[in-house]
Amino acid sequence: MRRVSEPSFFSLLHDFFLCYLPNEKKASSNTIRSYKNAMLLFLDFTKNERGIKLNQITFNMIDKNLLLRFLDYLENERKCSISTRNQRLQCIRSFYAYAATREFLAVVYWEDIKKVESVKTPQTITSHMSEVAVSEILRQPDIATRKGCRDQFLMLLLYQTGARIQELLDIRLKDIRFGRASSVILHGKGGKVRAVPLQDKTEAHLKKYIEIFHANIDSYSQEYLFFVLRNGLRKRMTEDNARKLIYNYGVSARSSCHEVPENVHPHLFRHSRAMHLYQNGVDLNLISQWLGHSNLETTLIYAHADTELKRQAIAKAIPEDDLLKSHLDAERYIVSDEETLALLCGLR
């Protein structure tokens, strides 16, 4: 009897990224990029664990134990959040689920991989930075250098627009609109597009940045606003590049400002901007549109976080033996009923 051959790992990987995701699933370019990043990290980890070259990886070299070690590596060594860990896992599971529909022998590998489940994300107050902390981080780059000028503006624009890091790095020169109401076009999740207005100071910084890095380039150019040079060519800056530079500036700022968190990452600027807008009286509906949330309930985390911070401040100010202490229950402030939701949204 002829022996049944092992399913081709890289052949299925090729079809998954070049055929299935873009053509059948109609995934956006951002989603595909996210899946690729997750798989590349996993394959790099696999070849290092097995002591082999990339092209030697096969299905039978990967099992749930290897995948669990990879997820622990993301969380413990790369300092990824639980949500990032779960997102990477979902990308890998999606590939294996696809492979199982194309090659019946891949079903056994999928059955093993799908035993690895997502980690439940603990309910915590949404992390954000104070305005003092944001200002201290923005002071860290040496703006006398080109790199410092670029880095400072990248973080400033990230904060002022409340953009996701992928949205920021996807900005091209053609997405910028100068005029009476200057704005920048952001390309969000699911192909959604939104225009975010620019404050006068941000607009001034943007024009200065363009003069330095995009002089004499057509404003309708497809060139990325933020780029790196590779082999003399301008390439889109990657999310990893941005995360590393932001983390390093956070470490530097923390040495002179205790309000700066230990782990400063791009999404922290988004959360911080949303919290500062809310604390300054901006309506939740406007914040939701600003952030590009498809569901207003997603934006309510900032209302809950602000309320919880106030509760904690009051708790610190009340002596332990005071009768009021027993009434300071955090559960009271979780948004769960329709009436409270309507009230927070300005519908009551």
Image: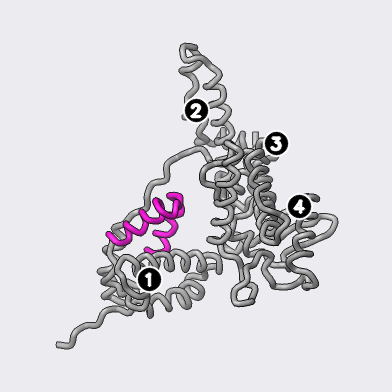
Q: Which mark is residue 98?
A: 1
What's drawn in magenta, residue-wise?
A: 65-93
Please give left or right for residue 264 compared with residue 90 in the image: right
Q: What amino acid does circle 1 point to?
A: Tyr
**Which residue is depicted at the point 65% across and 57% down?**
151
**Which residue is depicted at the point 58% across and 58% down?**
242
Q: Which one is closest to the eye, mark 3 or mark 4?
A: 4
Relative height, residue 235 to residue 73 (above, below): below
* Sooner in the amino-acid sequence: mark 3 or mark 4: 4
Q: Which residue is mark 2?
A: 332
Q: Which one is closest to the eye, mark 4 or mark 2?
A: 4
Q: Which residue is mark 4?
A: 202
Q: What amino acid does circle 3 point to?
A: Asn
Residue 204 location, quadrant: bottom right
Quarter containing the C terminus? top right
Mark 3 in CB contact with mark 4 (< 8 angstroms): no
Q: Please tell me whether mark 3 sits on a helix, a strand or a loop.
A: loop
Q: Which residue is mark 3?
A: 280
Bin the neighbour count of mark 2 within 10 Å (Cα to Cα): few under 14, some 14-19, many 20 and up. few
Q: Position of residue 214 (x, y in %)?
A: 75, 68
Mark 4 in CB contact with mark 2 (< 8 angstroms): no
* Sooner in the amino-acid sequence: mark 3 or mark 2: 3
Give the distance between the C-alpha atoms of the residues marked 4 and 2, in whole angstroms. 39 Å
* Sooner in the amino-acid sequence: mark 2 or mark 1: 1
Bin the neighbour count of mark 4 within 10 Å (Cα to Cα): few under 14, some 14-19, many 20 and up. some
Q: Magenta span has 134?
A: no
